[in-house]
Amino acid sequence: MLTKIGSVLVTLLIAPLLPGIINRVKAIFSGRQGPPLLQLYFDLFKLLKKGAVYSTTTTWIFRAGPIVSLAGLLLASLFVPLAGASSPLSFSGDVVAFAYLLGLARFFTVLAALDTGSSFEGMGASREVTFSILAEPTLFIIFIVLVRCTGSLSLSTMFGQAISLMPAKFAASLVLIVFSLFVVCLAENSRIPVDDPATHLELTMIHEVMVLDHGGPDLAFILYGASIKLFLLVALMAHLILPMDSGDPVREWIYFGATVATLTIVIGFVESAMARIRMIRVPRLLTAACIIALIGMILSLR
């Protein structure tokens, strides 16, 4: 019970640290001092103290969007195991619930953007939905491969002991889906090369343009939810790269933290070494990730 509570607290407290690590890596590569490592924490506290201004054009959907989105991501975090410990909430088939909770968060973010009546936010919502059509099937294919490799329909066991006991013949499939999951992580979290979270040019934005009218606590919920989604997907990759089954909780948490930090640094390195690709090429990148995941699924069926 204490381990499950600890997993929830780690997710709630550590998630905003990951964007700070990425920004620090990007600052080092560009020769800048950059923002503090804990900048997102400061921003969240500042936004929570502010009030919110709502347009007369918007309805209750605009106000409910950030709340429902954050609630969906928080609920999804309960299905993800951390450092080899069982997840706080698990059942057979929760892998499907996890994916649909991520979709629910996106759905209400898109609805809130459309509710403003802004052409710019509608454009961003259109792009978000278009790219999600390619990202979500890739995520489901990854889960299908893991179900085939581990024989489990629950994230708690799928990313727990079952990974470490997986036969060696599935190693090639595992490598392919890790790459696909990395691309999905970049796309789902609006990172370079798919999107640039630091841009302020509406014509090139995807996710950021959808939240232009949000402010105060609503924007804090959106930023916090985005950091939780990033943490969850990085945590899943960490379990695939380094299965946690040593039997020593302290050692597992150290390995897990080091792997998460390394993957976050890699994301920062990718954003520093690459430029954002053209909008028309984003579907090609996501399609390539989907094809790679399909190859992994074919190999797992041998």
Image (tube, helix red, strand yellow):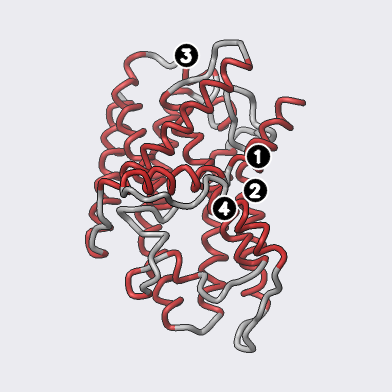
Q: What kind of residue is marked 1?
A: Leu
The C terminus lies in which quarter of the figure?
Answer: top left
Sequence-wise, the earlier of marks 4 and 3 is 4
Mark closest to the chain's N terminus, 1 or 3: 1
Camera-nearest label, 4 or 2: 4
Amino acid type shown at disc 2: Leu
Residue 275: image x %, image y %? 25, 55
Q: Nearer the viewer, residue 205 or 200?
A: 200
Residue marked by disc 3? 165
**Which residue is denoted by mark 2 in the rendering?**
74
Q: Mark 1 and mark 4 in contact? Answer it, CB < 8 Å.
A: no
Q: State the residue position of label 1.
A: 78
- Residue 50 vertical position relative to residue 161 in the rendered view, above or below: below
Tell me if 299 is positioned left or right of 36 in this view: left
- Position of residue 153 in the picture relative to residue 135 (left or right): right
Front position in the image: 253 or 281:
253
Label 1 and label 4: CA atoms lie apart by: 22 Å
Structural distance between the alpha carbons of marks 2 and 1: 7 Å
* Residue name at image x 60 percent, y 54 percent: 224
Relative height, residue 7 to residue 220 (above, below): above
Q: Earlier in the sequence, mark 1 or mark 4?
A: 4
- The secondary element bearing badge 2 is classed as helix
Q: Which mark is residue 40?
A: 4
